[in-house]
């Protein structure tokens, strides 16, 4: 460039800008087109998925409604009566058979049947014949039917349904029937839904859209044979955990999503697959955008040519402006250098100086941030094993006392808590922190049933950001130490209120409190944390309280403060002031 004349430099500069703008425009056009196609396909799948879920839920709710309307109608209830003379019973049977047949026709071949404990059996169709050898009370799932009032049988084989064995796969729904006069169990009302009807529910008018129901036993029900191969690939993808409840690409051209579909009878999966090749898009708007972009690039080209006229003054002014910004602590400024003469050497020297300063400052900042984050993660990791150990003790105690149901509930709650702990967010809301603490208290109350907890939290503060795992360790500290030798009238009060520009968080209990010497030692430890929050703490009985205080000092520094008020034998009050995040 040094030996090229000024006119050639201007020409080459203009041509380069135009070529780069054209290539950039084509790349942006291609990216927007791909993005638009993807978003349109995702939106299409989500809309069809939601529509199909609503239709399926409505269908099974309608089956429930039909069942209860029929099962508790007067003529069905009359059939359940034992003291009905023979002629009247025969009339009721004939009417029931005819009416159930009409209902079956109305619901496209769903088969309705009534089986009473008094021996009456009546069905809606002649195509399937009742198997009088079937005894509902001897079914392995009979206890589940008694407990839930409902049961679904959807398995192949000789044990399927209440009819003589047949080749078709179907779904059989059992509803427990009661005499509405005596409230005694009178029998069961049965609906048999053929697979063909489920396929009709899964049918769709959208081109390239396929639906399938993945049963709990691995069976896949699809609308037709056309989409069977596609749905089989989706089933394999689900088995390999490559399908989730968000729309993603299953294969190269297919978009797929798998969602839970739950009823009172079963928990299945609805698989939705869309062939993206069937999607039609109008790219006229994007073509117009490309033309506009090229026109803009032409204007930029003119501006670029004019800029060359400032060949000598522009780099010097840029260097001067860069030096002023560095003086204002705006580091990392780099100037574009297209020169090979002395001006180019000047710009290179400026860029090297700016990069060195930025690198040095950024290095120091990262070292401090990494050290601080490591300390916080270490403190958080010390809380979870301690809490898990206490919860396992509760579960062990419940099992030893043969309180299996309570033990299961504690395990479920523990699972919810640890799913919460696995969340990677450092910040949550005050409402989420309170919910997490309440879940923890549900577990504690299985061991300490007389515990009373009071919450005094301003509802307007519920959505404010809050550092994760602050309240629960403080509550656990009160329970573990404050109520160790106290067996009655155990109370904890949790309060959060706005105080000037801060949040005032208070945790108070009526436990054992602390003796003066213990209180003095604890306050000395907290002051040491304040002076050097990154220093590793020695072992202590109040690890939960100290961890919380250390994390808060690491996060807020001198903007955070804590006060502990106690009286031996009467309780303890922890009062913290935390900067309010908006």
Image (spheres, helix red, strand yellow):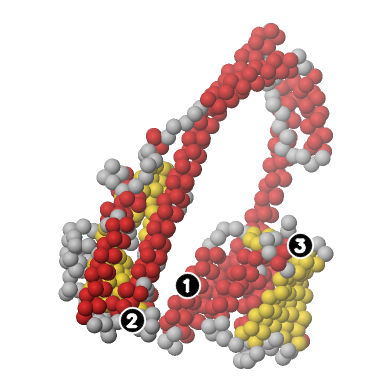
Looking at the image, do the residues carrying marks 1 and 3 touch, with CB atoms under 8 Å apart?
no
Q: Position of residue 480 (x, y in %)?
A: 61, 82
Side of 576 relative to 3 (left or right): right
**In the image, is residue 178 above or below residue 460?**
below
Residue 465, placed above or below residue 79: above
Front one among 435 and 221: 221
Residue ID at (49%, 38%): 40
Q: Position of residue 530 (x, y in %)?
A: 75, 68
Mark 1 vs mark 3, foreground winner is: 1
Q: Secondary structure at mark 2?
A: strand
Residue at the spot 73% in from the left edge and 77% down from the top edge: 574
Question: In the picture, which quadrant includes the C terminus?
Answer: bottom right
**Mark nearer the N terminus (2 vs 1):** 2
For marks 1 and 3, give the CA distance. 35 Å
Mark 3 = which residue? 579
| Residue that label 1 marks | 412
Look at mark 2 in the image and give the residue it sits on: 185
Q: What secondary structure is found at the residue carrying circle 3?
A: strand
Query: Residue at 32% across / 57% down in the picture?
Result: 107
Is residue 190 shown left or right of residue 25?
left
Q: CA distance from mark 2 to mark 3?
A: 62 Å
State which tag comes first along the sequence, 2 or 3: 2
**How crowded is the residue under tag 3: few (<14 C-alpha within 10 Å), some, or many (20+)?**
some
Residue 265 in the image, given as x and y percentages of width and height: 36, 66
């Amino acid at each position: 460039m040094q030996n090229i004349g000024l006119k050639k430099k201007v020409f080459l500069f203009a041509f380069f800008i135009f070529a780069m703008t054209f290539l950039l425009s084509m790349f942006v056009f291609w990216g927007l087109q791909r993005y638009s196609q993807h978003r349109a396909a995702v939106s299409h799948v989500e809309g069809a998925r939601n529509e199909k879920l609503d239709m399926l839920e409505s269908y099974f709710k309608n089956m429930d409604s039909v069942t209860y309307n029929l099962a508790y109608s007067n003529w069905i209830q009359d059939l359940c009566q034992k003291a009905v003379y023979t002629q009247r019973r025969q009339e009721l049977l004939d009417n029931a058979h005819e009416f159930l047949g009409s209902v079956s026709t109305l619901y496209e071949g769903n088969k309705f049947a009534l089986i009473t404990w008094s021996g009456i059996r009546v069905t809606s169709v002649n195509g399937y014949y009742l198997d009088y050898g079937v005894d509902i009370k001897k079914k392995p799932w009979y206890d589940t039917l008694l407990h839930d009032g409902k049961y679904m049988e959807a398995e192949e084989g000789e044990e399927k349904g209440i009819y003589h064995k047949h080749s078709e796969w179907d779904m059989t729904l059992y509803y427990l029937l009661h005499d509405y006069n005596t409230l005694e169990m009178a029998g069961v009302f049965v609906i048999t839904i053929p697979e063909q009807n489920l396929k009709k529910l899964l049918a769709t008018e959208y081109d390239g859209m396929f639906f399938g129901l993945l049963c709990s036993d691995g069976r896949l029900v699809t609308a037709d044979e056309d989409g069977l191969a596609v749905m089989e690939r989706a089933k394999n993808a689900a088995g390999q955990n490559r399908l989730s409840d968000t729309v993603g690409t299953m294969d190269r051209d297919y978009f797929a999503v798998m969602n839970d579909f739950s009823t009172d009878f079963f928990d299945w999966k609805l698989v939705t697959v869309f062939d993206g090749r069937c999607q039609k898009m109008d790219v006229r708007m994007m073509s117009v955008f490309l033309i506009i972009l090229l026109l803009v690039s032409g204007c930029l080209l003119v501006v670029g040519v004019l800029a060359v006229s400032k060949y000598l003054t522009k780099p010097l002014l840029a260097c001067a402006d860069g030096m002023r910004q560095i003086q204002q602590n705006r580091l990392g400024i780099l100037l574009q250098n297209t020169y090979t003469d002395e001006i180019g050497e000047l710009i290179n020297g400026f860029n090297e100086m700016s990069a060195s300063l930025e690198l040095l400052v950024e290095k120091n900042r990262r070292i401090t941030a990494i050290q601080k984050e490591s300390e916080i993660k270490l403190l958080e990791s010390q809380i979870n094993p301690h809490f898990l150990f206490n919860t396992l003790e509760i579960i062990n105690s419940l099992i030893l006392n043969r309180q299996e149901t309570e033990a299961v509930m504690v395990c479920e709650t523990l699972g919810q808590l640890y799913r919460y702990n696995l969340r990677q967010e450092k910040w949550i809301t005050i409402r989420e922190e309170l919910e997490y603490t309440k879940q923890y208290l549900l577990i504690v109350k299985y061991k300490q049933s007389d515990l009373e907890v009071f919450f005094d939290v301003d509802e307007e503060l519920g959505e404010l950001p809050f550092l994760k795992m602050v309240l629960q360790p403080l509550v656990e500290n009160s329970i573990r130490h404050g109520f160790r030798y106290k067996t009655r009238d155990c109370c904890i009060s949790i309060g959060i209120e706005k105080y000037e520009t801060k949040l005032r968080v208070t945790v108070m209990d009526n436990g054992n409190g602390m003796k003066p010497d213990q209180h003095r030692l604890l306050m000395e430890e907290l002051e040491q944390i304040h002076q050097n929050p990154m220093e590793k703490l020695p072992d202590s009985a109040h690890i939960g309280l100290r961890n919380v205080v250390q994390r808060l000092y690491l996060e807020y520094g001198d903007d955070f403060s804590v006060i502990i008020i106690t009286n031996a034998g009467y309780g303890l009050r922890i009062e913290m002031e935390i900067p309010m995040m908006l």
